[in-house]
Amino acid sequence: MAFSLTDHPHRRYNPLTREWVLVSPHRTKRPWQGQTDRPATAERPAYDPECYLCPGNERAGGERNPDYESVYVFNNDFAALLPDAPEGGNSPAPGPTPSAGDGDAKTRSLFCARSERGICRVICFSPRHDLTLPRMEVDQIRSVVDAWTEQYREIGAKEFIRHVQIFENRGAMMGASNPHPHGQIWATESIPLIPHREIEAQAEYMQEHGSCLLCDYGRSERERGERTVVETAHWLAVAPFWAVWPFETLVLPKAHRASLLELDEEERGDLAALLKELTTRYDNLFLTSFPYSMGIHQAPTEGLTPDGYHMHLHFFPPLLRSAEVRKHMVGYEMLGEPQRDITPESAAERIRQVSATHYLSEG
Ligand code: H2U
Ligand code: ZN
């Protein structure tokens, strides 16, 4: 019997993080039936007097939100990182001027720590409490894209910030504390683990092949088409070959861009349109407000842009079979490596099959 990616257990390699995922496609031989029942939707009010993100309301920290009308950004009242954390620790400081650090090498290797300065902000996508990205107009999503761009520029310009992580945690299942549409920004003086790996992998690919990893990958996914989920004039969303989460997607600009700052007008508008379509399809998959963690990976904001660096967005949704049944990363996945049953190819097909019009606005 000849090995095939659709029938036999195998491992796939993620060239961005250099991790492997175990794929067990033989466990999913039953056909996809789709979901036919409409869920009971508990509609939320456009304004909730109890919500700490709604316009005009008081936040838990005591400050009051202005009567904002589009996007609103504020410093997180319970920030995980602080700009004025005292410097110290026994490991070398990150960046261009490492200091030696205290203690002998053996102690440092066993009990290594370093202070970390940073900034945390919250970004409300809309004054409307009842909306989500897929239910917002493309113009309003475009304002969110512009705000992300402006925040990356402004926070990235601070002398002690090297990395700006913009993300959205959506849904109680993902730990979002409030249904009001919002995201977060955590910016740090070091480059965190996952972006760091991706930067190195992209730079080494560029050295080895003389071209950009994600330019090459995006081009060949567009030729193959089997993992494409949404394609617009300037953007591509695919279920990556190495996806870990059942309906994970990777969103790429077709042109080589290191950050949101390099996008032109059309590319920005087009990103908003792609985000609307992708998140609408996600909602339609299980007729639910699809939970996910989404984040934008961009070039470090200090020093030269690393060789071959190509910005992108990751969507990591936890759902597996329905609005209630999620994938758990436990057992073998905690101890060995991640595993999935449904292949990224069939996940992409399912996302393509559902409507691009939101189920709540269909007649
Ligand atoms: P999550 O829904 O992803 O938890 O994000 C909400 C953030 O809002 C969270 O980081 C902050 C929390 O610290 N927050 C405030 O800054 N002010 C408040 O009044 C409540 C919550
Ligand atoms: Zn609200």
Image: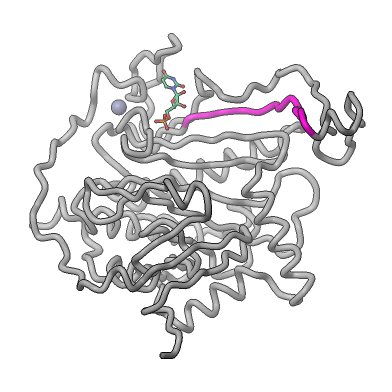
Above or below, comparing residue 34 to residue 122 in the picture: below
Identity of the residue drawn at 36% across and 79% down = 7
Q: Nearer the viewer, residue 17 or 266?
A: 17
Above or below, comparing residue 249 to residue 107 in the picture: below
Please state the horizontal and vertical placement of residue 2, each as a whole percent of the image. 44, 90
Please state the horizontal and vertical placement of residue 114, each as a whole percent of the image. 76, 27
Question: Quadrant of the rendered structure where residue 324 is?
Answer: top left
- The magenta region covers 110-122
Instruction: Give the position of the C terminus as an image quadrant.
Output: bottom left
Please state the horizontal and vertical placement of residue 251, each as a whole percent of the image. 48, 61
Taking the image as shown, residue 360 lies to the left or right of residue 197, namely: left
Residue 120: in magenta span? yes
Residue 53: in magenta span? no
Identity of the residue drawn at 62% across and 51% down = 298
Taking the image as shown, residue 251 lies to the left or right of residue 288, namely: right
Instruction: Give the position of the N terminus as an image quadrant.
Output: bottom left
Q: Nearer the viewer, residue 291 or 355?
A: 291
Above or below, comparing residue 322 to residue 150 in the picture: below
Question: Quadrant of the rendered structure where residue 17 is?
Answer: bottom right
Identity of the residue drawn at 24% across and 71% down = 353
Identity of the residue drawn at 9% across and 52% down = 38
View quadrant of ligand 2: top left
Q: How is the image coloured?
A: one colour
The residue at the far top in this view is 62
Numbered-mark total: 0
Above or below, comparing residue 330 to residue 31 in the picture: above
Please state the horizontal and vertical placement of residue 303, each as a whole percent of the image. 80, 47
